[in-house]
Image (cartoon, coloured by chain):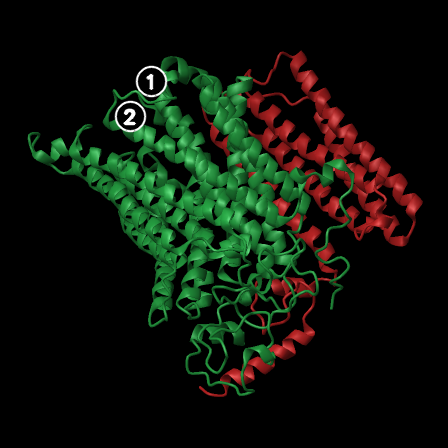
Chain colours: A red, B green
Amino acid sequence: MPGTREIQEIEIIIEDIGGGGGTAPPAGGDGGDGDKDRGRRPEPPSARRYYTAIALAIVSILVFFMALASAFLVRETANDWIPVHLPAVIWVNTIVLMASSATMELARKRLARGDAVGFRTLWQVTTALGIFFLAGQLVAWRELIAQGVYVASNPASSFFYIFTAAHGLHVLGGVCALLYVLLRAFEKTSLSRALAAEVTSFYWHFMDGLWIFLLALLHLGK
Amino acid sequence: MATYNSATNAPEEPPKGLLRRHVLFRTDHKTIGLRYLWLALLSVFVGMILSLVMRIQLVWPGVAMPLFSGFGSTPERYAALTLLHGSLMVLMVLTAAPQAGFGNYLLPIQIGARDMAFPTLNMLAFWTTVTSLIGITTSFFFRPNAGITVWAAGVALFCAAALANALNFSVTVMDLRTRGMTLPRLPLTVWAWFINALLGMLIFSILLAACVYLLADRVLGTHFFSSAAFLSSAPQYPQEHGLPAVWQRLFWFFAQAQVYVAMLPCFGITAHLLSTFSRKPVLAHRAVVLALCAVGLFGFCVWGQHMFAIGMNPYSPLAFSLLASALGLPASILLMSWLGTLWNGKIHLTTAMLFALGFVSLFLAGGISGLFLAQHDLTRAADGDDFIIGHFHLVMGVAATFALLGALFFWFPKMFGCRLDEGLGKIHFWLTFAGVYCVFMPMHWLGLIPHLRVSPDSPLVAAVAADSAIRSFVTVATLVTIASQAIFVVNLVWSLLGREQAEAENPWRATTLEWSLPSPPRLENFVAAEPAVYRGAYEFGVPGLVEDFLPQHLPSTAPELRAQPQRGGGESVAPARQAAEAS
């Protein structure tokens, strides 16, 4: 097929003129993730990696908790299972966590409007609510211990402690991210505060939803 | 056009503080990749010595071995030996070396990036891996009960490190590709690392969850995997209680896919080497990429294949059998592509090429015995015997090692600026190649003989006895094979000590981006300018050029490509390459 090569190479050279950093130039549509990138608002590649990373991390954490939950579903069918009465403070904690997601969105709206002071205040409230949630989970543990329900008492209580501990550690990581967004001097870096806040918010809302799922599992499970 | 000089791949800010600047905390992907490789080299030798100890113990149980006699020869010790051999080889060698080792070193320079997406995370993952190696190894020196707890903690740490690595790899491939490096133009090695990272991100999460439960059971006294009643009364039919199955499911969900995590990068490396050394484009490039995806996908779904013997829903073995057999499809596509690439190629039998061919041979041999194991009724009979050991070591352990050695011989000039000695390398290859077949083929027969219905006084029965001639032969073959690795060590040390003259940039006349860099590459790889990529990764055998290949980073009009400004015809352009280019 003489001649074919020539045409192809001309095409390729034209493609390269349109190519953007890191992104695949539109090579006639390979499909895959190249298409998704194009639909998104143009971010420089150095920023886009944070979105990709948080999306993948969320998938990975989700799989981790699904594996934990699958063992719960199998284990609760055994005959040594004694259900745990969830302490009432758990419901307060749940509301606190959901409220923190709401204040976080409000804070990000302020930041988008350029209201740095309002953002700081609301972001501080969000952080405080996050810490409040963690403290509340500890109170829940203390209540259970006061009732004589320990980690090793029963499979059901073991699952309660493990789920809350694993989720709490992830929330603790989220609180660290919140503090980072609050305290970091972003002026010196290529990373903007809005971007850091957005990526943190994805994670935080995910933690929120994950907690609802775990709570439903613990509450509705046998 | 994004700003390459400022922020794209450069680290956010210069390292500051003693901690950041210390040599141990270097975040350069090449340094970290090499460290993973040294770690794997250390582990592979420890693991080999352990396997030798086991073989000697099996055949000559009375022999006193230096160093090991101090531990006392209880059955627990032997089990600990097996555990340590397995975890070192599977985690530190087969998982860490092809992905974290070669991947870290080569992935950024093959896609034209300055470093991984998150260099600090990369460095932390490496040191977590080292900690986990220390944990796993020291578990051997504790009493068995405490030892297993330490081991599980070590494995949990390894999971964390593997997850961080997988995240880093996938983000790097998705977002840090250079201008023009479209997905179809990625080298197959990069594809394999990418798919592997996605798979690893899923399965190491599951193993981490299993480790959390296991550690809670051992440290906090919970009963996730065993009910108290079950332990005290030891019921006759453990399946009915279903509790051990919880662990088995979580574990095999990880462990079956883990086989493919070890193999996927090796598929990529093999395809890359075969194409380079037969001077032909990879046959059916796109089908190979799809096959790699399919291996990852099916591999994630066949966990139940290992649990035929525990008693499961009668329909599920059928489903798992079908899925496991379906893995034969992508495997055949890969094999066809490798053989088709070799067909009519101008084959250069370098040591790297020999190891790649060795991989193909071992993969074929192991793959055929694997077809037997995908049948659930056969597997139930063969569960845990020599056939499985032979199959698994041939395909996973040895084949992957061959791909690793091939990769080392191939990329050694890039990493260290000198070649490994070809003569010593070939002697090493042939001894190892013959050796591993002598070790693992008889194991297949040993596994099959007990299932033949022969009379008890038949000579075949004597052949499987513990002190039979076949078993002694296997042990002697192990000894010889391990001894011949000394040639490799000599070769490695000699080449590293004796290097003084700089190796050419591109000694193998390969096409991918790393060969456009000096050997070894500088700190931030592409210092002067970010490379642009003009074509797919396997443009070999192109007529009308000074050389017979088109590197990815040169435009077709580059003066160094052509003696006279005349374009060649397209006779030898393979359809696969056209597909990759035209799309």
Q: Residues within 10 Å of mark 2 (few under 14, many from 20)?
A: some
SS for dot 1: loop
Whether label 2 touches label 1, CB < 8 Å = yes
Q: Residues within 10 Å of mark 1 (few under 14, many from 20)?
A: few
Residue B10, percent across and down?
A: 72, 54
Give the camera-side residue of B522 and B239. B522
Q: Please, what is the three-letter code of the amino acid marked with disc 1?
A: Ser
Give the camera-side residue of A119 and B543. B543
The chain letter under disc 1 is B
Residue B316, percent across and down?
A: 36, 42
In this view of the protein, can residue B279 be seen by the observer?
A: yes
Residue B74, percent across and down?
A: 34, 17
Would you identify the image quadrant in which residue B517 lies? bottom right
For the point 7% across and 33% down, the residue is B458
Location of residue B351 with respect to B284 vertically, above or below: above
**Residue indicated by mark 2:** B57
Residue B141, percent across and down?
A: 46, 20
Q: Residue A201 vs residue B114: left or right?
A: right
Q: Please, what is the three-letter code of the amino acid marked with disc 2?
A: Gln
User: Which of pointers 2 and 1 lies earlier in the amino acid sequence?
Assistant: 2
Mark drawn on residue B511: none
Location of residue B159 with respect to B557 vertically, above or below: above
Mark drawn on residue B73: 1
Q: Residue B396 vs residue B460: left or right?
A: right
In this view of the protein, can residue B300 be seen by the observer?
A: no
The chain letter under disc 2 is B
